[in-house]
Every structure is written in C-alpha cells, then in structure tokens.
Amino acid sequence: MVNRVHDDVLEMGFGSDLYICNALIDMYSRMNELGNARKVFDKMPQRDVVSWNSLISGYSANVYWEEALEAFREGRLSGVDADAFTVASVLPACGGLMEVEQGQIVHGLVEKSGTKGDMNVSNGLLSMYFKFERLLDCQRIFDEMIVRDIVTWNIIICGFSHSGLYQESIKLFREMVNEYEPDLLTITSVLQACGHMGDLRFGRYVHDYILENRYELDTTACNIIINMYAKCGDLAAARQVFDHMKLWDLVSWNSMISGYVENGSNKEAVDLFKIMRLDLQPDSVTFVTLLSTCTKLMDADFARELHCDIIKKGYDSTLIVGNALIDMYAKCGKMEQSVWQFEIMNARDIVTWNTIIAACCHYEESYVGLKMLSRMRMEGIMPDVATILGSLPLCSLLAAKRQGKELHGFITRLGFESHVPVGNALIEMYSKIGSLKNAILVFEHMSIKDVVTWTTMISAYGMYGEGKKALRSFQQMKDTGTVPDHIVFVAVIYACSHSGLVQDGRACFNQMKKEHNIEPRIEHYACMVDLLSRSGLLAEAEEFILSMPLQPDASMWGALLSACQASGDTVTAERIVERLVELNSFDPGYNVLASNVYATLGKWDQVRMIRKSLKDRGLKKDPGCSWIEICNRVYIFGTGDRSFQQFKQVNDLIEDLNRTMDKEGYVADLKFVLHDVGEDEKINLLYGHSERLAIAFGLLNTKEGSPLQVMKNLRVCGDCHTWTKYVSKIVQREILVRDANRFHLFKDGTCSCRDRW
C-alpha cells in the first residue's frame, strides 16, 4: 500500500515537489521504512528545514540514534537553521547514545537560537540530562522553566526516583498533584520511591489516590504496589493487593515471596511457593530468594528439595543460583556441600570467591579459606574490598603472620588502604596475630577514623592488658568529636577489666547514661561483673547482678563463678553454680564451668549429671587445641596429642623443664584437672595440655633466645599459666600466648596479665 502511494505520486509528476516529498519521508518514517525515507530525501532537488526534521525525527522515533545524529550534523553543515522541532528530535539521540559532548553542543544551540522557551525542547533537555545522570543540570533546567506541562513533571519525578533521589521525587509528586493528574508511570515511580524510603504513610496515600481516581492497574503496576508494601513492612496490605489481582505473572509471585522473606515470614514464603508451583514454573530469582529462607529456617530437607528442583529446571548452571547455593549450604552448617558446590561450578565470579571465603571464615576453616584466596589470585580474579574483608579474619584465626603481612602488601598495591573498613580490619587482624605494634601503625596512618576504628584500637589495647592506653584512646576519640556508641563502651570496660582499673571501669559505665544517654545493655552489665570479679570484689559483683534491671544471663554468673573458683570461695561458688544450672544454658562452656566447680568440690554425682545433660542435648565442649607458626607453617596440637612428629623429643623436653621447675619451687596445681582419677594421672593430664606441647615444640624448632607465640582456642588454665612463667625464666625467652580471652606476655618469670584462677 505504501509503495503504491509512492508510485502514484511519481506517475502524477509530483516526485520533485518539496511538500509532497516531505510528506513521503514522514510516511515512510511512521511505517519504520527508514531506507525508503532516506532514498526519497537523497533524490530531492531541494530541501527545507521540514525535510531535515522529518528525516531526523524518523530516525530518532525508530531508535536509529546514530543515523539521527549524523543527519543532524549534515543539516548543520548544509546551512539549515535548526528550529525547536529539530532540537526536540535530536535530543533523544544524544541521550540514547550517551553523547554528553554532543548533547551539550545541542544545548548551546538551544540557548543561542532562543528555542529554550519551547516546551518540547525543555522537556527533551531534561530527559537527556537524566540519561547523562547530570542531576544538577536537570534541577537547573526544571527550575528555569516558566511553563511546565504534565510531561515535564513526569520526567523529573521518574528521573529523580530512578536516580535514587527518592525524597525529592516524593516532594515533587506532592506539588504536581495540586495541578495535574499524573499518569501511571509517574505514580509507580513514586511508589517505588516510597518502598525504598520505607515511607508507608505516603505509600498508602498514593495507593488510595490510585483507587479514588479509578486508575486501570495492569499487572506491572500491581507488582510495584506489592513491592512497596512489602518493603515498608505491611505484608497484610501487600497480600491483599496480590490476592485481588486479575492476572499474576512470575514477578508477582516473586515480589510477594521476596516480601515475606525480607520481613522474616519464611514459612509463609515457602507456603506461597508451593501454591505457585502448581501453576507456574519458578525462575532463578525465585530460587535465589527461597535459598535464603533455608538459611533462616535451617531447613536442610527443604534446601535439598530446592536444589533438586534447580537441577531439574537447569538453573544449576546459573551463576547467581550457584553462588546462592554456596552461601545457603555454608549458613546451614554444611561446609562440605558448600565447597562441593563451589568446585562443580563451571563459571565463577568475584561473588563466588567472596562467598566461599566468607563461609570459611564463619566456620573457622582458615586453611581452606586461605587456600581459596590463593587459588583465586592464581586464576587471575582480582580481589575487591569484600575479598579483603573476608580474608583478613582468616589470618586472625590462625595467627598467620606471613599471610597477614602478604595481604597487607596486597591491600597497599591495590590502593585499598584508604578504605576505612579495610583499615579497621587490618588493626583487628594485627592485634589478633600478636602484633600490637603493627596495629598501632595502621591506626596512626589512617587519615579518616570512624567509631569502629577507635573501638577496634581500644579493644586491641584491652586484649594486651594496656588499660591505661585504652582509656587514653577513648578520651582522644571523644576529643575528635566522634560520638561513642554502645559497642565502644563494651571495649573500654573490657580493657579496664583486664587491667584491674576498677574505678575507671565504674566511671565509664556511669558515663554511658549520664553523658551519652546510652542505656546499658546486657553486655555492659556482663563487662562490669567481669571487672568486679577479676578484681576479687565477689560480694559486690553478686550484689551488682542481683540489682540489675535486666535478667542476668549465663555469661554473668559464669564470670563470677570463675572468679569464685580462682579465689577458692567454695561457698559462694556452690550458691552461684546452682543459678547457672537453673538457666539450662545451651552454651556448653558454662555447663562445663559448673561441672568443673562440682569436680573441685568432689561432688562427682553432680558432675556426671551435668555431663549426661550435655550429652542428652547434643552439646559438646570444644576440645582444647593450640597452634604455633614456625617458618611460615602452622603446627596444631590437641590436648593429650601424641600423634605429631617429634612427640618423644617434646615429651622429653617437658620432663626436663619440669625437673628444673620443681627445684625452683613449682608445684602442679591439681585442681585444674577435673577428672575423678589418681594424683599421678592428674599430673600426666596437665603435662598433656595443648599449650605446653606447642611451647615445647616451639622451643625445639626455633633459634635459642628468639620469642615464641602460641595461640589457644580456650582459656589458658591456671597451672599452665604458672608453668609458662617458669619456662620463660628457665629458657630466657619471651613467650606470647593468646587464649580465648586475651594475650599473655610471659617474660623472666612474670606475666603482663592480671588474670586470676
């Protein structure tokens, strides 16, 4: 039909008529036959601005942006004066191609030609600058517009919303509805802004506006309303919209399921998924969302069911699903399956590596995590900040100094040192691997420090028993204008506790409420109980617990009980152990502590009862282990371990040291052997404690006089503490031991700590 019209024009002899040729170009452009439109244009003996506008607008309207921009340039070179229609046609092409420089040239032409007052031109400029993400230019153009139409308001409201300026978008919408009736695109953009802002009140207002003005809602609009209500936490309203929809698509189901998951209604999410599966096949988004519910429900059976569905539907090769499976298995405590999923993936991205490294860190699989980091670098994947933040704690767990320093060098080469979270993680890593000096150096070189930086440094001083320095840092933090939070108060009271600074600790606790309006939490009360208990103020500690406005937990009674045990106050200990047993804590450590007190008192029936309770509840005490790094290799020793190489030499050295120590007055404290066995057997059990094996192994395999550093996963027992003091004096070595609580620096028969046993 189109070609017949063109043929008729030629037969009638109008092929060279300017007005008819312009009409033909327009006709072909509207029919998306741009090739024919160009042929007509090229054969025209003469052209005017309408000819150029018809061609440019045809190209632009049909998304032939490069051709539109080229035609605009040709027209300028041929001497045609661009008018408002020309500019309005070429601006979408500039925006579509992200031709910022060309767009600014066109804008300059608008200013010179005086076409700025044309509504279409101003709207075109506004739309173009939003595509360039030049929001200040958008605001300036909008403010300078004397007259605006509904298109203007739609462009700026949608533009601000899509650019993340949600508050501005909502504010403009409030102004717009006083003069114009917004279209559905604008309304849904504002609803998205409400969702991101969590502004339920205004979201409801917009939804009511839709209902009152009888807008015809399509499925996409309903999905956006569901999403808004879900993000604002009103799941009942979201479900009501969902239930009243005429037609659901996959996004509808995913939006509702995701809403349930984000708001912690995991069972409802699973139930809705089962209904959805009756009529509609899930996609990768559905599976990724539901995999996160498995971690929250700790439902391994549902996880396996989902994984089977994923494989059947062919989504197991999808990268985002594979990453979610790694994360899900790790968070469900299935590290073997997590690593297996990682290994079978054909493609991996930075998220894959970061997920498996973070999983290793969470489950203290330091060797596996560091191996993954090494593999990642060998495969040419460049670590990002998330990789670094996931890897540094691996070094802390193992006290792997070499790997920690290597990572620090890598951070410097990548230019990540300026990232405050990375600096904070470095301080923590160095403090936990026994290098307080390097932690301080990192801290001092940080140009920007946040409250986490100061807290990490204060905690580091606390771990090393440097309470005065911790208090000094706390004061410096306040002097810089950094506002303390509840976590920093935990750190500073902890530091006071490990340095015996009772008055300072009390002052900090009182300062929280009086000066900073921070209501003490359970952890602050626990720190105060620890402070008083460690300082031997047992009666005051018990009175403090009983006068608390909060219900005391096992950690408080445990701290006091440990102090009673150390001081030999069996009367108070027996009274407190009853409270601890009543709490029926699921932390095996406190149950073991109660058992230990009964063992000290010789009440073996109660010991057996607690141990049976632990067994019945499937709780186990973490076995004691210690480790030492020698020549870039980490050696791990368990309590009573006889399987390692050089066991005989280590055992002989311990016996030699014991003979020397006996002459100097050492007597084994058998109260730390909490087994119903004979005295000789108790002594043998003490000799097999993991830190003694690690220290003796270190003495055998390092240069004479060089310092040793040993790490232990549990608290060092009182007898091992005394034993290590003697060893440091006999061998004339500095021995640094990090246990579950803090660092102990042994030197010349003394220790830096104030711990009591």
Image (spheres, rainbow, N blue to C red):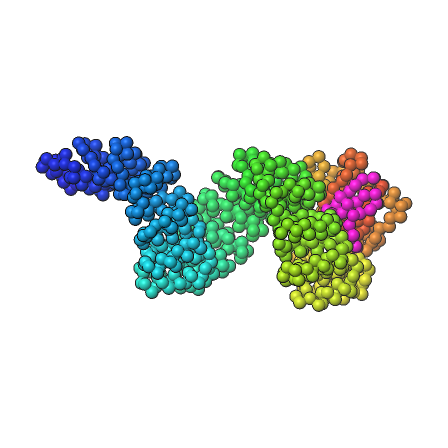
Q: Residue 231, relative to residue 438: is it above or below?
A: below
Q: Quadrant of residue 31?
A: top left
Q: Splitting the image into 4 quarters, where does residue 167 fall?
A: bottom left
The residue shown at (79%, 54%) is 756
Q: Residue at x 31, y 54 (%)?
A: 150
Query: Does residue 445 lie above or below 567 as drawn?
Result: above
Which x, y percent locates residue 327?
53, 48
Residue 607 belongs to the span the image colors magenta: no
Magenta highlight on residue 749: yes
The reply, left or right, for residue 724 in relation to residue 526 is: right
Judge whether residue 658 can be spotted in this image. Answer: yes
Left or right of residue 395, residue 202 in this image: left
Q: Residue at x 63, y 38 (%)?
A: 408
Of residue 277 and residue 188, the one placed in the foreground of this image is: 188
Front residue (pair 735, 212): 212
> Is residue 690 at all visible to an observer of this figure?
no
Residue 455: give x, y in percent of width and height. Answer: 65, 50
Q: Position of residue 701 (x, y in %)?
A: 76, 36
Quadrant housing the C terminus: bottom right
Indicate the quadrant containing the N terminus: top left, top right, bottom left or bottom right: top left
Q: Which residues fall within the magenta stretch?
A: 731-757
The image quadrant that residue 129 belongs to is top left
Q: How many marks?
A: 0
Give coordinates of residue 624: x percent, y percent: 72, 49
Residue that protrudes farthest toward the left in the picture: 12
State the residue at coordinates (26%, 37%): 81
In this view, which residue lies farthest toward the right? Answer: 663
User: Which one is nearer the viewer's eye here, 489 or 379?
Assistant: 489
